[in-house]
Image: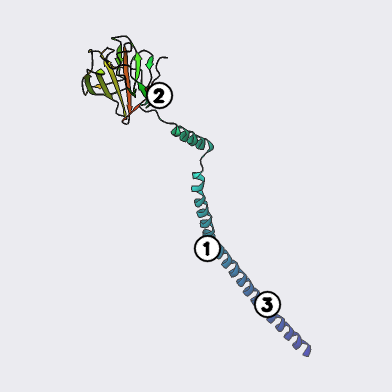
Amino acid sequence: MKSNKNGGNNATFTKKWFYIAVIFGLIFATITTLIAIFRNVSTTEDSPKFLNEDFIKTEEKIPDIKKEEPKNSEESKKTSQSLEDVPKKTNDSSNFIKPTEGKIITQHSNGELVNWKVTGDWRTHDGVDILAKKNTPVKAVSNGVVTDIKNEDSTWGLCVTVDHKNGFKSVYKGLSEQIQVKLDQNINAGDVIGTVGNSNKIEGNLDEHLHFMLEKDGEWVNPAKYIKFSS
């Protein structure tokens, strides 16, 4: 009888611990599951943050990529700058033509005093004397407007002045009476102003010629620096 009682007690004790083990196993499984779920949720919540940071970094890099110019573009830019450094042609020497055909027989004196045969004194020769026969056409050296027509009878004779509106003025002296322009008239380069005459008395010792003068910014300059005359 004692033997059966002890066997019953042992069976009850084993059964009791079995249930306890099962309960602990369930608790452990539940805790493990909750931990896994928590980690998964935490990772899911953090993921957009990392993605957003990477996206922002990528967006910040895009402007730098756009700012980089291809080599061809840089070379074109350098070429453009080089072209900009080249002086642009103005209504200067490149646009002046010869006032008449003929070679220079008296040069511009560049401010030096020279002896004038007719007057017998010393003075500067502020123009050039271009050898040409009487009635040879005299042309405007560039575009401009006629600002003065006068007769200096005792010295230069008939004279015409043209303002080229760029700091330059041209003066044609010793013309014949066949002047073909009017005061305030707009003229173009090559338009005939008049013809070579013999009204220039102060240089009457010379052969028939045109006394041509060029003024820049109020000062007489050597026309040969701006116009290629016949040699």
CA distance separating discs 3 and 2: 118 Å
Q: Is residue 124 left or right of residue 57?
A: left
Q: Which residue is mark 1?
A: 45
Secondary structure under badge 2?
helix
The spot of residue 33 in percent (x, y) is 60, 68
Identify which amino acid the numbered label 1 is placed on. Glu
User: Badge 2 is on which residue?
Assistant: 225
Q: Quadrant of residue 28?
A: bottom right
Element type where label 1 sits in the image: helix
Q: Earlier in the sequence, mark 1 or mark 2?
A: 1
The residue at the point 48 percent across, 36 percent down is 77
Furthest-right residue in this view = 3
Tally the numbered discs.
Answer: 3
What is the secondary structure assignment of the residue under circle 3?
helix
Q: Which residue position holds label 3?
A: 21
- In front here: 110 or 130? 110
Quadrant of the image occupied by residue 151 = top left
| Residue 57: image location, x then y, percent | 52, 54
> Do we see residue 213 in this rendering?
yes
Q: Residues within 10 Å of mark 1 (few under 14, many from 20)?
A: few
**Residue count near mark 2 (Cα–Cα under 10 Å), binned few <14, some 14–19, many ≥20:** few
The amino acid type of the residue labelled 2 equals Lys
